[in-house]
Image (cartoon, rainbow, N blue to C red):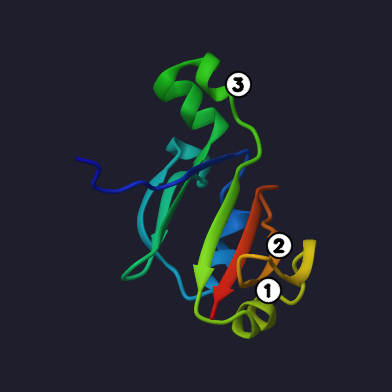
């Protein structure tokens, strides 16, 4: 029945968020410019097994009205990874909101805030 879920992170500007995910190996899969501004209204970033989408609040307001655009908040993504060390190297300058830890359920985790203000916890199991 359910096939796929992808987070859509609503931000004021997409461009500052791109280096965060590109440093982790994602590429732009699709993008939609915002008219004459030269900025992006929407983007999909992904690889073979991972996808995240961004849309500006202004674009959401145009697409679905101001009520939905006003629902923009801060998302918390939980991302399973093979190992934390490559993440820590790639995002060395990003702000950490959750210091590296080992959880009771057996994962090593670190929480990093991406440039749009969203929270991303990276977790390696085993």
Say above or below: 112 vs 48: above
Query: How far apart are the alpha carbons under marks 2 and 3?
Result: 24 Å
In the image as oriented, which residue stretches furthest toward the left? 1
Res 34 quadrant in image? top left
Is residue 112 rendered to the left or right of residue 46?
Answer: right
State the SS at label 2: strand
Whether residue 85 is visible:
yes
Whether residue 23 is visible:
no
Disc on the earlier residue, 2 or 3? 3
Q: Which residue is mark 1?
A: 91
Is residue 115 rendered to the left or right of residue 39?
Answer: right
Q: Which numbered dot is residue 70?
A: 3
Within-10-Å neighbours for mark 3: few <14, some 14–19, many 20+: few
Q: Quadrant of the C terminus?
A: bottom right
Q: Which residue is mark 2?
A: 112
Q: Nearer the viewer, residue 82 or 43?
A: 82
Residue 26 horizontal/vertical position (percent): 45, 69
Res 64 quadrant in image? top left
């Amino acid at each position: 029945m359910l096939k796929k879920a992808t987070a859509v992170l609503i931000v004021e500007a997409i461009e500052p968020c791109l280096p965060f995910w590109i440093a982790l190996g994602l590429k732009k899969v699709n993008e939609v410019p915002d008219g004459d501004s030269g900025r992006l209204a929407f983007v999909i970033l992904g690889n073979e097994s991972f996808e995240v989408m961004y849309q500006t609040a202004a674009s959401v307001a145009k697409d679905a009205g101001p009520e939905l655009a006003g629902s923009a908040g801060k998302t918390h993504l939980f991302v399973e990874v093979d190992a934390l060390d490559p993440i820590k190297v790639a995002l060395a300058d990003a702000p950490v909101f959750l210091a590296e830890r080992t959880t009771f359920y057996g994962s090593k985790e670190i929480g990093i805030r991406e440039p749009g203000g969203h929270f991303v916890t990276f977790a390696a199991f085993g």
